[in-house]
C-alpha cells in the first residue's frame, strides 16, 4: 500500500495526505484533497484555542458554522488568525496572588 501524497495548501509542499476525509461534505473533501496529515495535526490545538476563547458550545449550529469557517480560513485563507484580543500566556499579566 502506497502513501497518498498531496500538494499541501497549508504547508506549501508535497506531503503524505489524510487517509480519508476528516468529515462529510464539500469542505471535508477539499481538506482531504489539499491538506497533508502533518498540516491537519495543526488544527486540533487551533480549534481548542477558538472553542475556549469564544466559549463555543459545539451543539449550537452557529458555533459549528463559525468553527468550520475558521477551519477553512486556517487551511485555505491567509493563515491562522488568532482572536483580536488574544494575549499569549507568556505575555499576560500575572494572576493576582491569594492572601
Image (spheres, rainbow, N blue to C red):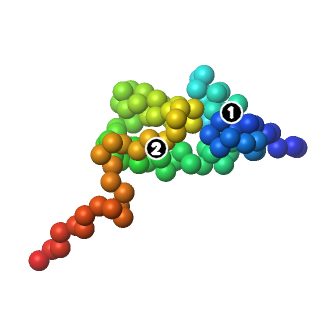
Image coords of residue 40 (percent x, y): 61, 44
**Position of 6 relative to 37 (above/below):** above
Mark found first going from the N terminus, 1 or 2:
1
At 46% from the left edge and 34% from the top edge, which residue is drawn?
70
Residue 15, visible in the rendered structure: yes
Quarter of the picture holding the N terminus: top right
- Residue 33 lies left or right of residue 68; in this view the side is right
**Position of 45 relative to 21 (above/below):** below
Name of the residue lying farthest toward the top: 26
Separation (CA) of disc 1 from disc 2: 19 Å
At 53% from the left edge and 32% from the top edge, which residue is drawn?
77
At 54% from the left edge and 45% from the top edge, which residue is drawn?
43
- Residue 87 lies left or right of residue 98; in this view the side is right
Q: Residues within 10 Å of mark 1 (few under 14, many from 20)?
A: many
The label nearer to you, 1 versus 2, is: 1
Q: Are marks 1 and 2 in contact (CB under 8 Å)?
A: no
Q: Secondary structure at mark 2?
A: helix
Image coords of residue 97 (percent x, y): 17, 73
**Residue linked to disc 2:** 47
Nearer to the camera, 77 or 66: 77
**Residue linked to disc 1:** 34
**Position of 48 relative to 63 (above/below):** below
At 33% from the left edge and 42% from the top edge, which residue is drawn?
84
Quarter of the picture holding the C terminus: bottom left
Residue 19, visible in the rendered structure: no
Nearer to the camera, 29 or 38: 38
Image coords of residue 36 (percent x, y): 69, 42
Q: Secondary structure at mark 1?
A: helix
Image coords of residue 20 (percent x, y): 70, 36
Nearer to the camera, 35 or 92: 92
Amino acid at each position: 500500500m502506497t502513501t497518498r501524497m498531496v500538494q499541501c495548501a497549508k504547508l506549501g509542499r508535497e506531503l503524505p495526505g489524510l487517509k480519508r476525509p476528516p468529515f462529510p461534505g464539500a469542505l471535508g473533501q477539499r481538506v482531504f484533497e489539499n491538506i497533508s496529515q502533518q498540516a491537519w495535526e495543526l488544527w486540533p490545538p487551533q480549534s481548542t484555542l477558538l472553542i475556549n476563547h469564544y466559549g463555543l458550545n459545539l451543539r449550537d449550529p452557529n458555533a459549528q458554522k463559525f468553527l468550520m469557517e475558521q477551519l477553512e480560513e486556517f487551511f485555505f485563507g491567509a493563515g491562522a488568525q488568532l482572536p483580536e484580543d488574544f494575549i499569549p500566556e507568556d505575555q499576560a499579566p500575572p494572576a493576582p496572588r491569594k492572601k
